[in-house]
Image (spheres, grey):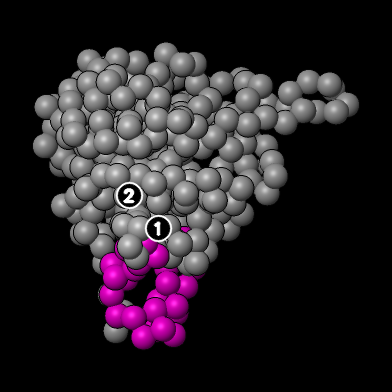
Amino acid sequence: MTDLRVELAGLTLRNPVILASGTVGYGAEYRELVEFETVGAFVTKTITLEPRSGNAPPRLVEAGGGLLNAIGLENVGLERFLDEKLPESAELPAPLIASIAGTSAEEVATLAEAVGARTEVDALEINISCPNVERAACPLWDDPESTALFVARARASTTKPLFLKLSPQTANATVVARSAADAGTDALIVANTMTGMRIDLDARRPVLGNVTGGLSGPPLKPVNLALVWRIAGSVDIPVVGSGGAGCAGDVLEYMMAGATAVEMGTALYGDPGSATEIVGGLVEFMERNGVERIDTYIGAARGEAA
């Protein structure tokens, strides 16, 4: 009998597969497409204090075997999220992690207090690393001092488990990670998308309305996998891998590098059932190798490097 459960900052997840923010909306609108009862948890679209209409279209294009998105944190804002979206999303049979973002530590603290007060929310994920919004909306991804301030203010505003989503495009990744851990985040999501672009040859113009967007999917996995390896070796809190996971093998690579769980999402665009297939693939791999508990894979590749 395989045991897929993992412990993540006080949460017991039925398995390590988490649906990443921005890939299933607020959750409820995907209930007919995604089998939420088979995944470990899901993360809502990022919520800001005020509503955002997002970037100009086109906002999504294929690129190098992955996707470029420039949604721009489009969302209904805090008030409508709490009143309209959250009650429906909370009916789904999986733990709910609410993603939040703000332009200041005060905004993030306000969001953390308001969203964290709702019993429907199991944990909070602070997004400081969206690459397709103006810098003011996600200003911190390479600034350890400001990151620590944001985390500390949010930590003081809620008792819910607090996660922080890092960026892959900083030379200070381990410094930022340690700063966030010291300030009180309970886990680190490693990592967000990476800035990229495409050109329309006929129009001689960038394809995306925002010019650049965030690259996700298979091309991002080796980059973020290496980052998980580095960060997991530098902090004492759980790390969640994110970027390009499309099969059970990808999830296991992230776990063996040191991740406790793995966020996935781009694969859902090609096959909404991919998360369920990944979980089934994990069971098959473990049974084939005589492994009973999946948490024994966490950091398994590190050896003396851990």
Disc 2 element: helix
Residue type at the position of mark 2 = Ala
Magenta span covers which residues?
A: 275-302
For the question of whether residue 237 can be seen, the reply is: yes
The residue indicated by pointer 2 is 232
Task: Name the residue furthest right.
Answer: 202
Image coordinates for residue 123, horizontal then vertical, percent: 23, 42
284 magenta-colored: yes
Task: Residue at 31% x, 36% y: name it.
Answer: 177
- Compared with residue 41, is residue 76 higher up or lower down, i.e. above or below? above
Residue at 73% x, 27% y: name it. Answer: 207
Q: Is residue 272 visible?
A: no
Relative to 160, say whether 183 is above or below.
above
Q: In which quarter of the image is the N terminus?
A: bottom left
Q: How many labels does the image show?
A: 2
The residue lying toward the viewer, choosing from 256 and 233, is 233
Tell me which label, 1 or 2, sits earlier in the chain: 2
Question: Is 245 drawn above or below residue 213 in the view shown?
Answer: below
